[in-house]
Image (cartoon, grey):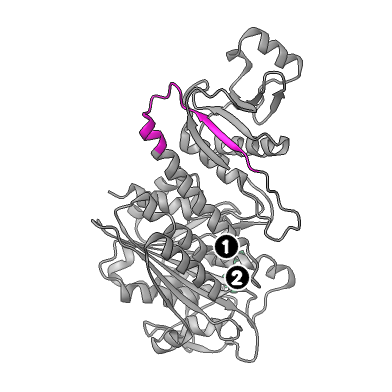
Amino acid sequence: MKIELCKDIEKFDVEVILVKNLKSLEKDLKNVLKNLGFSAEEGSSIFLNDLKKMFVGTNKLKDEDLKITLSQVIKEIKKYKFKKVKISLIQEKELDLKTLVEGLILGEYTFDKYKSKKNKFKCEVLIDIEDSIKTSEQLVLELENTKTICKSVNLTRDIVNTTPEDYYPKTMAKTARKIAFKNDLECKIYGEKYLKKNGMNAMHAVGRASRHESQLIHLTYKPKNSKGKVVLVGKGLTYDSGGLSLKSGTGMISMKCDKSGGSAVLGIMNALKYLEYPYEVHGIVGAVENMIGGDAYKPDDVLIAKNGTTIEVRNTDAEGRLVLADCLCYAQDEIKDIDYIFDMATLTGACIVALGEYTTGVMGHSEKLKKKILKASNESGELVGFLPYNRYLPSLLQSGVADITNAASSRAGGAITASMFLDKFIKKENKNKWLHLDIAGAAYKEKAWGYNAFGGSGAGVRLILNFIKNLK
Ligand code: BES
Ligand code: ZN
Ligand code: ZN
């Protein structure tokens, strides 16, 4: 879909008009619409062929409601096969361009790589900016930045939706190389030999039974006058069968989504150069496949992580924290003077139980940092909920044979104990700089929701880009 800003648009197939209620329309038109049964109810729409106008009812002309409405509009337009669409930025009041464009681009997304019939229809949206109170320069910048962000969300969605047969650790490394090349990023990629040599035994163990070699990916965006350093660590389980603690048949369905954290990191790294953010950003992804086989790691094994912590494996399905543990150690060993360090992972089913399917669970020590993420959540529209630590839960991770176990002795509070496990791998000086984001719910759904299609949502991309944008 092409989106352009214009003034005096004369040629178009259809004009989209968002109406709060019929009162704002002129009498004749109001009567026509009334007679056709259109009452401007939220989400309802009507197309008047003679006038080439599509009226869309919406009481709330802002934020997420507007995005959802626009996602419905664009689907409708594609259904009717209109090629040129006019939308005026000034409706009853000026719409927020970013919101409008996000609704259109994110709402238009479909994943048809594996469908025999592809939807090739493309339309052009002309946004009439006549009478906007903003300058053309401001609006163009806003449009282009929003396009960049949405493209990166859709890139993340594509990665997540690709099958484990087609997308394995080396594929993820290939994507990272491509992103690095396109955006002038530094790119380091390491295989299993490096993991073994550098004591990353926890990450190495998880991928041992797979026919696909694990990959440690490290991308760096270095702007000229950097004001600080942000480190992002993503769980990139290209498939999670559960390992020897095998998942059930239904539990395994959709576990291609277990690379969502790493995919979000790649999406974010793909946007930074264009957005010209003045922060150095490191994107680290542990790309691994958790499988079964003669060489699989086992419950009862004790693994020594990169920072020397010994881990008793009690459940091979709690593999994400093992991969992240070593990746977090790698990040803190390799990168000095970190200002912020976030990990993103589809880490626990317990997080979905705690917060529901749509909300990212955020955990960490710093209330100040959580407030910053909350601001980014409100601005981006990505939902977050905070899960609290307490003094009693860490004992659930006690092990009889090692320093810690990878599976807590109770399922209760599972999202929090998983985060407490990761905390063992955060250096003292970084405790208040770190947040753990459990995106198990928000990252993937086998149904469409809001302006998200079936499958990957790109959770984390807009949230973190918004966070970085807000840094002073
Ligand atoms: N990848 C899963 C978590 C998950 C569940 C993501 C549902 C997306 C949707 C993770 O590796 C896992 O299996 N976690 C276990 C941990 C348990 C064994 C301690 C879980 O949540 O049950
Ligand atoms: Zn698992
Ligand atoms: Zn997993």
Location of mark 1 (residue): 159
Residue 431 is drawn in which quadrant? bottom left
Residue 230 pos. (x, y %): 33, 61
Residue 446 pos. (x, y %): 69, 56
Counting other residues with Cα less than 10 Å from the Cα at mark 2, is it few (<14), some (14-19), or many (20 or more)?
A: many
Specify the segment rendered in magenta.
Answer: 122-140
Nearest the viewer among 222 and 5 is 5
Residue 242 is drawn in which quadrant? bottom right
Q: Classify 171 as above or below 40.
A: below
State how many labels appear: 2
Q: What residue type is labelled 1?
A: Ile
Residue 247 pos. (x, y %): 68, 74
Task: For residue 390, say whether it is visible.
Answer: no
Nearest the viewer among 91 and 415 is 91
Q: Classify 50 as above or below 471.
A: above
Q: Residue at x 61, y 58 (%)?
A: 444
Q: What residue type is labelled 2?
A: Tyr
- In three-dimensional space, the C-alpha distance between marks 1 and 2, rounded to whole angstroms, equals 8 Å
Location of mark 2 (residue): 167
Query: Going by the picture, which residue comes out furthest to the bottom?
Result: 294
Is the C-beta separation of discs 1 and 2 under 8 Å?
yes
Q: In this image, 351 relative to 120: left or right?
A: left
Q: Classify 141 as above or below 28.
A: below
Counting other residues with Cα less than 10 Å from the Cα at mark 1, is it few (<14), some (14-19), or many (20 or more)?
A: many
Query: Which of the four quarters of the rendered structure image does ligand 3 lie in?
Result: bottom right
Q: Tell me the SS state at disc 1.
A: helix
Query: Going by the picture, which residue comes out furthest to the front?
Result: 11
Residue 397 pos. (x, y %): 48, 76
